[in-house]
Image: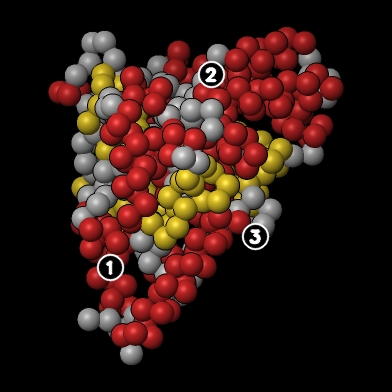
Amino acid sequence: MAKDIKHEIERANSEAARRMVAADPVLVDIAPAGEVIPGFKDKMVLHSGPPVDWQHMCGAQKGAVIGMLLFEGWAKSKDQAIKILEDGAITFEPNHHHQAVGPMAGTITPSMWVFVIENKTFGNRAFCRQVEGRQQFGDYSQEALQDLIRWRDIWAPALRAGLRQVGGLSLKPIIARALQMGDELHNRPNAASSLFANAMAVPMMKAGVPKEALISTVDYLAGHELFFLGLSMASAKATADAARRIEYSTVVTAMARNGTEFGIQVSGLEDEWFTAPAPPVEGLFLPGYGKQDAGLDMGDSAINETVGWGGFALGGAPGILSLVGGTPEEALSYSREMQQITVTTSPEFRIPALGFEGTAIGIDVRKVVQTNILPVIDTALAHKDPGHPIIGAGLVRPPLECFRKALLRFAEKYGLT
């Protein structure tokens, strides 16, 4: 019986990895979240990580939520926003419950324009919001909201017009090229952002985007090295979701944090969350900030590591070390180490510094628990209190408890001892 179960697990995990490898993410639209994200309701705020309510949110996530209420016009001031939130007038749900992801606080509301990614291989869709360095970190100032307003009113509509001109943009070739150009697609998507800007500039012109909007959008893309993170996250979400709900599979389909808890989901355990307290991030701080200011690990962006990018591809992105800390030798060791806890390596996403080995893909909760090797994630740092922009970046690993809980639940569900 045990041998049969092991065979079923290996078969299921191979299928999960096959689906991830076969994924073909294509940007098909950029649109208001309320029009495209399934299950969106009025006065709803989607957030990063596993479920959390207003009372238990970390400071940065509270600040980001306040910012979204001001952005939507649901509140006219910080104090009014807090009153509305304390009265329970806003519904909170995780992005992952709506096929979506968001960086850091991850806040998405109906008027926020999002990337719409379709996995052409399997037909599923995923969504991600704009990436910026202020509101998503908890800054709710008028200056912080201006980027959201310009994204809604100028940049996203211009990009949508260009996208419709070309009928969608395949992202897999961009991702593969960027990984060979020094990106890891999480804290360093610089090459991918440039490749995307190159691909969209002429289509926006052909689409007849008004001159001022065109200049503003091209200038925005040219100066935003992290732009592609939103696209890589949505691509990763569309990739990982294709591997969900495979009976007997122990492959992780989501890792997400909200600054209070770290949570994972596993293919063979449907959509159940396995959580533990969010860990601190070891990293480097921007001038004026230090460890005493830092909040705990936060964001849905670990979906990138879930499919083998980000920290799993650090060996090919030594340029990022000036941001997150560490040495080139350590970066290479991280990428090799991740092969010990995954099902396979990608035949398409290859790292030159590792002799063109593929990125490790398909985190297996059994291997994590057996080896005590935890996934490595590179991430940004938010302040512990509301009202601040980005304060730094670094590296973090999930709590082992998440994987232990998942393995115990797996044993219970499938009758193992």
The quadrant of the picture occupied by the C terminus is bottom left
- Residue matched to label 1: 407
Q: CA distance from mark 2 to mark 1?
A: 40 Å
**Tag 2 secondary structure:** loop
* Disc 3 packing (10 Å; few <14; some 14–19; many ≥20): some
**Tag 3 secondary structure:** loop
Residue 263 in percent (x, y) is at: 32, 52
Q: Amino acid at mark 2?
A: His
Residue 309 in percent (x, y) is at: 45, 41
Q: Amino acid at mark 1?
A: Leu
Q: CA distance from mark 1 to mark 3?
A: 28 Å
Residue 351 in percent (x, y) is at: 48, 38
Q: Which mark is residue 122?
A: 3
Q: Earlier in the sequence, mark 2 or mark 1?
A: 2
Q: Earlier in the sequence, mark 1 or mark 3?
A: 3
Q: Is residue 276 above or below residue 81?
A: below
**Tag 1 secondary structure:** helix
* Disc 2 packing (10 Å; few <14; some 14–19; many ≥20): some
Q: Which mark is residue 224?
A: 2
Left or right: residue 401 compared with residue 378:
left
Q: Is residue 29 above or below residue 380?
A: below
